[in-house]
Amino acid sequence: MKAFLIGFLLILFVALVYALFNSPHEFSPEECQGCHAGMPQPGQKSPFPMIGKIRTLCSRCHYKLIRKYSHPDEIVPVNVNVPADMPLSVDKKVTCATCHDIHAEAEWSKGVYLLRRPASGIEFCSVCHEAIPGGHIINLKYAHSAGSKYVSVDRSGSLDRLSAACISCHDASIDPVDRDKLVGSGYWMHSRELSKHLINHPVGVSYDEVRAARSYMFNHRSSLAPVKLFGGKVGCGSCHDPYSTLPGKLVMDNTGSRLCLKCHNL
């Protein structure tokens, strides 16, 4: 039994050392055709024909990433300046390989999620995404599993333009090219962990109609400022201002639920 335990620990130690000093992205020549449609020529760089979509190939190992909460891929970038060292696919679309150096050619890339530049977070995102006035780029910290999502409930009407713009960026499952087609009221889930946010906030609903049904629960609209309504409806801009310097880009300090109590009469 003792010999078995020693042997098991030895195998575990060897596996740990291998994991620390060998990257699974250091592919051998024999593994090329596991992704590439043919053998790359010496010195040949991307783009190179693949046997399938890069997203699909990457997900064979990175299956825990949820695409709905990740940066959009397989789309042609619009109004974004993608630098030459961040290659698009052969059909000019953003892929996992646009941001990630899949072959880990640069030694430093292993320390920044195999990114193509020695930076991460805001600094890396700002390579393509320019900050709007007010520095809203500061909220672009994560490309994967940010944990928020918009759920449309009633598609009989349109959202206000600010809400549509907010949702098209913060819910990365929505193609920014199609954001004008995002219609209907719904609610925003601030977290995928419902235990943290059992009640998620509605967007695109008429404040007066809701108050008429439950007047004892909501304050009169005359006392809402600085909370704004958009055509009489609640929008992302009701609670958030992209130019705000407060945490969460809130329109006012929410200490003691002050912001919430502008609308909710609890």
Image: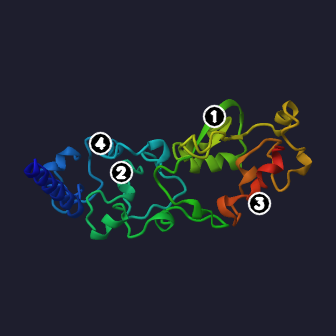
Left or right: 28 as drawn, with respect to 201: left
How far from the left and from the top, in percent, is residue 97? 35, 54
Dot 3: few (<14), some (14–19), or many (≥20) neighbours within 10 Å?
Answer: many
Marks 4 and 1, Cα distance to the nearest angstrom?
31 Å
Q: Nearer the viewer, residue 156 or 63?
A: 63
Residue drawn at the location 31% of the way across and 70% of the way down: 108
Dot 1: few (<14), some (14–19), or many (≥20) neighbours within 10 Å?
Answer: some
Q: What residue is disc 2 on? A: 89
Q: Is residue 37 visible?
A: no
Q: Quadrant of the C terminus?
A: top right
User: Badges 3 and 2: C-beta atoms under 8 Å apart?
Assistant: no
Is tag 3's residue or tag 1's residue first in the polypeptide sequence? 1
Q: Is residue 139 visible?
A: yes
Marks 3 and 2, Cα distance to the nearest angstrom?
43 Å
Q: What residue is disc 1 on? A: 152
Q: What residue is disc 4 on? A: 60
**Element type where label 1 sits in the image:** strand
Q: What residue is disc 3 on? A: 252
Is tag 4's residue or tag 2's residue first in the polypeptide sequence? 4
Residue type indicated by callout 3: Met
